[in-house]
Amino acid sequence: MSSLFPALAGGPGERVALRFGARSLTYARLAAAAGAVAEGVRGAGRVAVWATPELETAVGAVGVLVAGLPLVPLNPKSGEKELAHILSDSAPDVVLVGPGAELPEAAQGLARVEVDVHAEGALPAESAGDADPALVVYTSGTTGPPKGAVIPRRAIASTLDALADAWQWTDADELVHGLPLFHVHGLVLGILGPLRRGGGVRHLGRFTTEGVTRELASGATMLFGVPTMYHRIAETLPGDPELAKALAGARLLVSGSAALPVHDHERIAAATGRRVIERYGMTETLMLCSSRWTPPDPRPSVRADGEARAGTVGVPLPGVELRLVEEDGSGITAYDGETVGEIQVRGPNLFTEYLNRPDATAAAFTQDGFFRTGDMAVREPDGYVRIVGRKATDLIKSGGYKIGAGEIENALLEHPGVREAAVTGEPDPDLGERIVAWIVSADPEAPPTLAELADHVARRLAPHKRPRVVHHLDALPRNDMGKIMKRALTS
């Protein structure tokens, strides 16, 4: 197959490829360090990496991939039980770490290789095929132990090339983000994406609005983040004109990993004149949808602008087949913005299997090869996809209606007394399920009442979508990617 990183061999050698704070590597230095990693893991099966937000993680990942071996990113915040399960299930031969890194007890029995970013090595000839595994990434495991999704090399290449097509992503782009590197958002999109294009990465280590301002004001062109980060940006913008100016000058602002509330979309747009693009993907599928960007002017110095429609994730990316289906498996053809169905997808971007779980793998796919995402959505007349929630936790059947939790959450967030909101369903003897709102109040001393919130939602959406119960919380439970853990919300 063709190289995942053509710029490493004979590319822009003196251009900075990776920057983590004050530490950086040019393409020439990255090629040498990655070559040394590849030599150090020669003959191994799977290789784990202790995925801290540091230069060593990025170099280690590139080195393993150019060696043609499967990489298992390890979340440094995993608990002992979860980490022990992942290591037992994936059985890596070696773990890559930064110099002097301390590993928990569950990982101490592994052979350890320290990544030296100053080492010299030759890049091996890439001999792995398109279908060979590149990554084993473990899912969140909300209904049992995490499952290892085996992601082939073709999925990485096809996803990154499809995003390049949709976003006009080129070697002229410099990406800034502060995402963790143990998941596909931060690692595949945030590190491998710029390296495949021949551009640059500026990793913040830890997300701060000051870091975003600094990097965008000094030449970065793109920002990737999760809704929690964009919420902090929206909260900071009114009192920070430098942040507003930096965001206004960026070419592309992208949010993912969870839905970005419409309220935050609008606050950012009002302060900067820029709209945030939302894209849609999963561990098992990499990227599936995004809004497309069309430059208003062919000159590369002119910023590209396109329609970033709040509340939608755009249209399917090139190569992705997407359909909506009813509960009985029949297809939905109505693009009316109202008919809800489960998203199923097929394409080269998909994972091949859950490691050691043939039963789960078989259950995840239909007979004609579509992956069952478990996400519920509607399609607008022009094909835009609007996700309304997860089938297991966000589809509420109340009074004969199928209701997506996401649109109610967006409506609640438009209430001035609501800082954060989540919506679930619970059994109701009359309605089947009743809508439950979980609220973090803007003013805990004067929280909005159920009657206020119900009327607010009914006027914006429809009466049958109003909450029937409200719970006030100090904070919503979230995972490392900023997603609300709804299974932890129980009455």
Image (cartoon, rainbow, N blue to C red):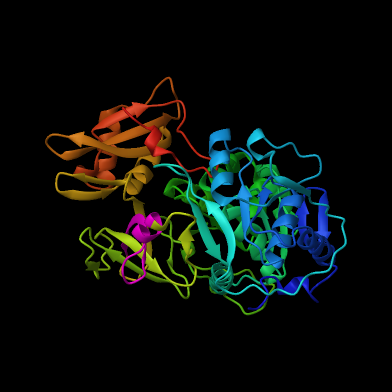
| Quarter containing the C terminus | top left
**Residue 42 shows in the view:** yes
Image point 81% across, 39% down: which residue? Answer: 100
Image point 74% across, 61% down: which residue? Answer: 63
Image point 33% across, 48% down: which residue? Answer: 407
Q: Which one is nearer the viewer's eye here, 448 or 321?
A: 321
Q: Position of residue 468 (x, y in %)?
A: 23, 33
Q: Position of residue 2 (x, y in %)?
A: 65, 78
Left or right position of 335 against 112: left
Q: Is residue 19 above or below residue 416?
A: below
Q: Position of residue 480 (x, y in %)?
A: 55, 41
Q: Is residue 475 above or below residue 287?
A: above
Left or right position of 336 against 158: left
**Bounds of the magenta span?**
359-379
Q: Which of the 4 image quarters holds residue 175?
A: bottom right
Q: Which one is nearer the viewer's eye here, 241 or 425?
A: 425
**How many marks can you see?**
0
Q: Which one is nearer the viewer's eye here, 114 or 217?
A: 114
**Residue 235 shows in the view:** no
Q: Position of residue 161 (x, y in %)?
A: 58, 73
Left or right position of 480 against 214: left
Q: Which of the 4 image quarters holds residue 80?
A: top right
| Quarter containing the N terminus | bottom right
Residue 390 sits inside the magenta stretch: no
